Amino acid sequence: MKIQYIAFLFLALATVVKCNKEGDILYSQRKAWKDPNNVLQSWDPTLVNPCTWFHITCNIENSVIRVDLGNAGLSGGLIPELGRLTQLQYLELYSNNISGSIPAQLGKLTKLVSLDLYHNQLSGSIPSSLGNIKSLKYLRLNGNGLSGIIPKKVLDLVLTGNLTEMNVSDNKLFGTIRTSKKRVTTITQDAKISS
């Protein structure tokens, strides 16, 4: 009986530590953003976990699986530590004023289904590490200032992953997209820019 109790306490402690780690990451992201509309005021680091915070959804194990902050008026950059939210499935940050580059560490979010960063002020290149996210179905990066080519590793998600929609229009990207695999995939890219 004593061993079962100790095992239970250990499991409970491990869950609290994990949730605190996720809360620390999200609170660090909060500090990196300007929040003129106070949509993040419920993000209190003294709470046991972030599952009670507005705009955060957790699974039954109290792991963060969703961040919903579209049209929130946020500005500032994305912190690399977001890549440590290992259970995250939806990162919805569209239509804000988020600037800077897309952290390569987001490629560690191997359970991510939707990455919606469209209509922000992101710049730099699309990290090839996003090609590690085989679970990704929706990649919407349109309406930013991204430049360079779309990494082949990301394009390969159309063939080897679950990607069904990729929108990279209204950026400064170049290159072409080709696919021979017969599947329903919507890819939106700007027309070829003549040099």
Image (spheres, rainbow, N blue to C red):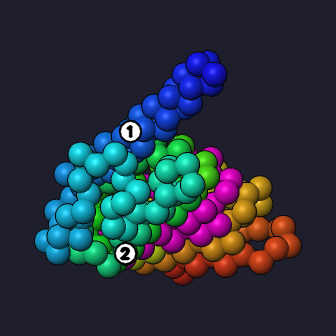
Q: Position of residue 44 (x, y in %)?
A: 23, 53
On screen, 110 above or below 35? above
**Quadrant housing the C terminus:** bottom left
Query: On the image, numbered disc 2 is attached to which residue?
Result: 70
Q: Tell me which label, 1 or 2, sits earlier in the chain.
A: 1
Q: Position of residue 101 (x, y in %)?
A: 34, 54
On screen, 120 above or below 131? below
Left or right of residue 36: residue 96:
right
Classify residue 54 by image quadrant.
bottom left
In the rendered structure, find residue 129 and report the number of the disc placed on it: none
Asked if the magenta segment contains residue 115, the reply would be yes
Residue at 26% x, 57% y is 43
**Quadrant housing the N terminus:** top right
Three-letter amino acid code at disc 1? Lys
Asked if the magenta segment contains residue 75, the reply would be no
Q: Residues within 10 Å of mark 1 (few under 14, many from 20)?
A: some
Residue 57 seen anywhere in this rendered image of the structure: yes
Classify residue 120 by image quadrant.
bottom left
On screen, 32 above or below 165? above
Q: Position of residue 145 (x, y in %)?
A: 35, 68
Left or right of residue 20: residue 135:
right
On screen, 89 above or below 191? above
Give the CA separation, mark 1 to mark 2: 24 Å
Query: On the image, numbered disc 1 is attached to which residue?
Result: 21
Residue at 82% x, 74% y is 183
Three-letter amino acid code at disc 2? Gly
Residue at 41% x, 69% y is 68
The segment highlighted magenta reads 113-140
Label 2: state its secondary structure: loop
